[in-house]
Image: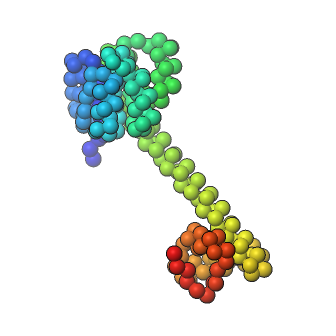
Amino acid sequence: MSKARVMVVDDESILRMDLKEMLAEAGYEVVAEANNGELAIEMAALHHPELIIMDVKMPRMNGIKASRIIEKTFKIPVVLLTAYSQNETIEEAKKAGISGYLVKPITEKQLIPAVEIALAQNQKVKRLLKDMKNLEQKIEDRKLIEKAKGIVMESLGINEDDAYQKLRTYCMNHRVIMKELAHYIIKHKSIDFSVKISS
């Protein structure tokens, strides 16, 4: 199984070369590189790497500003590289949604674990966002079904359990999903349970 696609951003070509070599040796594919923040954003849009390793201090646009734009626009995790470890820089990095932070000089023993942790955390966030989206959809579907059930209760003069059982039986007999049936009932304000609905 191939490892993640990574982009390297630093204004020092020798450091970029070192980073690319370390990443390649660990099995990562370096898909792009850049020497300033503006180019980093362009390359991120073009190559969609799974992770970006980016220097803080660069010409034209610094790494923190570029990281903020990349995170907001493309949701790509960034590991920042810096020669400094001041609290102010760390606070700025946290606000920019940085996934990792390494102080130069960088060794392979530091780089690879930071890369692996950043990628793992990003996957975890993606799963959580997907779970949240699924949960929100389930809640919306439940609201629709409850509304449709209320219409059935009122139109047939039956209780909640009987109305739900009618909906469930109809879905099973006619191979219709509950949400689709609920949409139909809400739209038409009623349903003939002996006839298959048409969209």
Q: Is residue 101 visible?
A: no
Percent coordinates x, y for residue 86 in the rendering:
47, 12
Residue 159 position in % (x across, y down)? 77, 76
**Picture quarter containing residue 79?**
top left
**Image: 127 above or below 31:** below
Which is nearer the eye, 146 or 90? Answer: 146
Instruction: Please say if 150 is above or below 157.
Output: above
**Residue visible at 64% across and 80% down in the picture:** 191
Q: Residue at x 60, y 81 (%)?
A: 170
**Does residue 79 sit above or below 73 in this rendering?**
above
Closer to the camera in the image, 108 or 58: 58
x, y percentage for residue 39? 29, 27
Residue 6 visible in the shown view = yes
Quadrant of the image occupied by residue 184: bottom right
Instruction: Answer with left or right where residue 180 lies relative to residue 29.
Output: right
The residue nearer to you, when weighing 126 against 22, is: 126
Q: How many marks?
A: 0
